[in-house]
Amino acid sequence: MKNRVIKVDTLCRVEGEGGIFIKIADGRITDTKVRIYEPPRFFEAFLRGRSFAEAPDITARICGICPVAYQMSAVHAMEDAFGVTVDGQLRELRRLLYCGEWIESHVLHVFMLHAPDFLGYDDALQLAKDKPDLVRDALRMKKIGNDIVTIVGGREIHPINVRVGGFYRVPERREFERLAEDLAWGREKALEAVRLVAGLEFPQFEMEYEYVSLDHPTEYPMLGNQISTRHGVTMAVREYEFHFEERHVPHSNALHSVLKGQGNYHVGPLARFNLNFDRLLPVARKAAEDAGLVPPVMNPFKSIIVRAVEAVHAYDLALRIIADYQPPAEPSVPVRPVPGIGFGASEAPRGILYHRYRLDDDGAILDAKIVPPTAQNLGTMEADLKRFVTANIDMEREELTLRAEQVVRNYDPCISCATHAVTIVRE
Amino acid sequence: MPAKRPKVAVFKFASCDGCQLSLLDAEDQLLAVAGAVEIANFPEASRRIVKGPYDIGLVEGSITTPHDVERIREIRKECRFLLTIGACATAGGIQALRNWKDVKEYTRLVYASPEYISTLDRSMPVGSYVHVDFELRGCPINKAQLLEVVNAALNKRKPTIPTHSVCMECKLRGTVCVLVAKQIPCLGPVTQAGCGALCPSYDRGCYGCFGPMENPNPPALSKRLVALGCDRRDVVLMYRGFNAYAEAFRKESDAHEK
Amino acid sequence: MNTEVLVIGLGNEFRSDDGLGLCAAREVQRRGPPGVRVMECSGEGTALLEAWKGAECVLLIDAICPGHSAGSLHRIDCRRDSTPHSLFRSSSHTFGVSEAIALATSLGSLPRVLLLYGIEGCNFTPGQGLSDAVVRSIPDLIAWIGADIADLTHTNEPARGTP
């Protein structure tokens, strides 16, 4: 019983698939790995020589779950390089588009991928047999997110309407008419979801995380050019690489990021929530408080509640943006390529997504660097796994395997990683 | 006893997950589909895995490692009807851009310790290793088309998927031609329909998500692109997108690189 | 891995904008990126050759002569691109940066990576303090350097091309 290996063969993606590997010998953990074995797709390499204008569409293909995040980080990096600022209604449209992606991603994760864990089902389809209304509502909630992305972005996966400087075409007010009612409904359902998931049973498990998120003076962060950490370091996005570095480890096709001089850190909903609680929209903040959730929240299992709270925030923000929306006269501001370097970051549903491009005088990309949120969380996931398994080493094999998967799923590493078969084998 | 429901399995290779997500995005149809078939293997959605053989196998992603080659051969044996979904599985995807480069160079650029990475020199479509019963285009696929192909396979009929160009869709929806009226470079004339002529309706040119149409004439389009002011490099980049390795696009981009 | 990067700030802080290289180097120093050594140098060529002796990756920061617009940033990959003599304030040093690079090239003692950064200055009169246009560009310059340091310490690979 004391010597065993917990192995999840197919788990998550950063650019794809991965698994968990935990080795226990004599009641002690001797190895913990979150492995990424999805073959590399070399985006950074083949971006070289492409035009700056192609970056949003090409990088979107890194992830079908959060293409908007890739597009947003890419356009901000290019605009930074060209010294262009996109604000006013164009910026609001970008935030609206992002609300769509947060809603899609969070609702999918909370109901379809994570809740079955807590409630003891294999998947949402099994859950649907017992609680059809819950799953039906969840699908509709998610669809509202898809609808936003479709209206603003043209289609729900790999939107086509985002360009450096703004959009190709901006929606007219009437295109949002139907949406307001749906959003109000979604907000109510998300409030119910906060109450529902807050009532789940959570393992006693807390970690001392170094939380890191974007930081905006007045907004709960989606877009921004400043980054803050829990321990009070604030930096401009373009100083990111002075503070964080990527390491390549043998068991993984993904790079691990660390905070220099400190090690692992934590990005994503929990980090955003803990660092920016005061900037949540009132309805979302109140929902959190009513559910007994106030910073600091150090239990990663509770990220499911935070996702529901962020969904409330996103529905409410989308409603506000639509209510005030006045189509801008031009769909984009003009950009003129200048040689230089651009830095951009945005808050993907899973946390900070950093892009950096070096460009020549024609606006062709000389080189590119992309750091996705899951790469930043990998070290933290491994640390969580180690702590969790150590604390529960006598747990029954099947239960422990399930919980180990859940520890990783707390980070919503990506949809493909979210649910998979696990085996524990004795050595 | 109720009739045994057909088993459907989803498999993933190098890709972004977007095409499988289309299945989860079919919110209105998902529960109905789940009732009509048995989802036997869909790791994106479920821990539950049912053993093969499967009636329908959906394959997303391109083949990029020696292990992938073995795996797709095994999968082929287990699936009665094999359907590739999306540009990666059907044409090698955006990652097929490596096929023009030295992959070792690529590995070195992205990873500090390239010796840990195992990869083939090229990113190839599923069809270059095993027989594929139907190839569904798109980056990402159109979910209505996905439901149509699955439905056709279940009912043993030929799926109704148009192979004409995006131009037809522009005409059908009444979109003014961006190439003619606004001189915007557009791949629509050589690209297969399926997206609903999305980009032209947003005032931008088509960038070829659905790959080459049936019997395209890229040289004629390229001539027009050059007349619009595109230089050789622009023309090469246009064809080298998400379906770069599809034969018609590959040949045309190569012709302009010489 | 663990390539050491040497950052050298060049110039004279008592000649206004000529001091920007020193100022930028101190900014890099203040951020203390691991694996990075920071030095200051007057810009005299032979001293420069001595300073980078044995170093594998060298990043030089210097002021650039007035050209089209004060405050504009330059980045030159010295192994790939030529370093026009006219760009630098070499008048006060008869054997300056460009000469040092040219000599090292012919002697085969050029560091494996040699990148040269500059900001275009506008005031090179005696006195302390940088002009506003230069001050505004320093954070960008630091960010550019940070990106290169990250690339060098990560893949051992110089970022290619200009900028």
Image (spheres, helix red, strand yellow):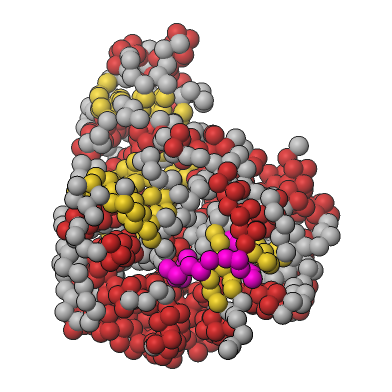
Q: Is residue A364 above or below residue A224?
A: above
Picture residue at 59% right of the left edge, 73% below the top? B7
Q: Is residue C98 above or below residue C75?
A: above
Q: Is residue B196 above or below residue A14?
A: below
Question: Is the stretch drawn in magenta largely helix, strand or loop?
Answer: loop
Q: Is residue C141 at least partly visible in the picture?
A: no
**Residue A183 horizontal side relative to residue A293, left or right:** right
Q: Position of residue B150 (x, y in %)?
A: 66, 75
Residue B204: name its quadrant. bottom right
Q: Is residue C107 at least partly visible in the picture?
A: yes
Q: Nearer the viewer, residue A142 or C66?
A: A142
What is the span of residues highlighted in magenta in the rendered image?
Answer: B41-60
Picture residue at 46% right of the left edge, 35% below the top? B114
Q: Position of residue A360 (x, y in %)?
A: 53, 41
Number of numbered discs: 0
Q: Position of residue B251 (x, y in %)?
A: 77, 47
Picture residue at 39% right of the left edge, 54% below the top? A19
Residue C107: name its quadrant. top left
**Residue C147 horizontal side relative to residue B143, left or right:** left
Picture residue at 45% right of the left edge, 70% below the top? B48
Q: Nearer the viewer, residue B121 or A75?
A: B121
Q: Nearer the viewer, residue B86 or C82?
A: B86
Q: Is residue B58 magenta?
A: yes
**Residue A148 horizontal side relative to residue C124, left or right:** right
**Residue extending furthest top?**
C107
Residue C152: name its quadrant. top left
